Amino acid sequence: MGDGHPVIFLHGLGGTRSAWGPQLEGLGDRFRCIAWDMPGYGRSAPLDPLSFDGIADRLVELLDHLGIARAHLVGLSFGGMHALHTAIHHPDRIDRLVLSDTSPAFGLDGTTRQDWVASRLEAIDAGMTPGDLAETVLDAITAKPLTGQVRSELIAAFGEISVDGFRSAVHCLPSHDVRPELSAIEHPARIIVGELDEETPVSYAQTLAVGLPNSDLHILDGVGHLAPSEDPVRFNRLVAEFLGTNDE
């Protein structure tokens, strides 16, 4: 949606391109806003095996397909991890980074890979689909229940996730750790986190801010893990301010 400098929106573990409605509508008058489905999600072909390097390569293939030399990346949670890996492995294709409710590494709270994977796949192993889990998950990770169109769009996004795609993503995520490379990421970066985010808490965002040499940190009061959906007005304002306008 829109024209101007391209901005790629990268969804989280429980999202697809449909999760970015408030951003495409709110920022499409200033930027060329592009929301993707990560490999194995929505309408995107899977990668086997799924890896962060492979996701970064697939993202660059999308840029090539669209004829985009360089783009801004806006990533939420798992998507923020994708943005970091892309900046590390393809630095010449990225301009600026917006990292929302994400982490420099898995397991900073002591959670083991085995326990985390088991907890995320328990319901799936019992025969449920990501779509079946949508409302329960959304209510668990937001500061207060979402309503209206935003809630409907996020539920729809869950419904577009295949069981196989979700399994692959759950097994991929715990391999994330870019702490040794953070100081080499020179791209301007804006880090946004909800003060009530219990999935990737403020301390994770602070670690990112300390490690990224050209970054700033914004904490949104009263917001949980889904800042772009919980407070799209403030989120979009921070993104637009940071990424600039068509004239810049």
Image (cartoon, helix red, strand yellow):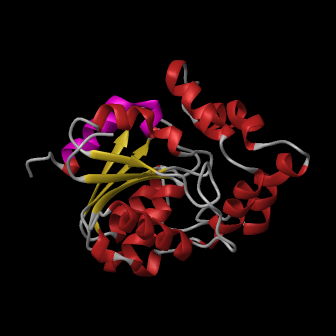
For image coordinates 37% across by 37% down, the residue present is: 23
Task: Give the x, y percent position of residue 229.
Answer: 46, 34
Task: Give the x, y percent position of residue 96.
Answer: 27, 61
Task: Give the x, y percent position of residue 74.
Answer: 38, 53
**In front: 118, or 205?**
118
Q: Which residues are magenta?
A: 228-241
Queried whether the magenta region covers residue 120, the answer comes back as no
Queried whether the magenta region covers residue 238, the answer comes back as yes
Measured along the vertical axis of the image, is residue 243 above or below residue 231?
below
Q: Main secondary structure of the magenta part?
A: helix
Does residue 218 appear anywhere in the picture? Answer: yes
Q: Residue 181, located in which quarter of the rendered image?
A: bottom left
For image coordinates 40% across by 31% down, the residue present is: 231
**In front: 157, or 232?**
157
For image coordinates 31% across by 64% down, the residue present is: 67
For image coordinates 43% across by 63% down, the residue present is: 62
> Which quadrant holds the N terminus?
top left
**In front: 101, or 127?**
127
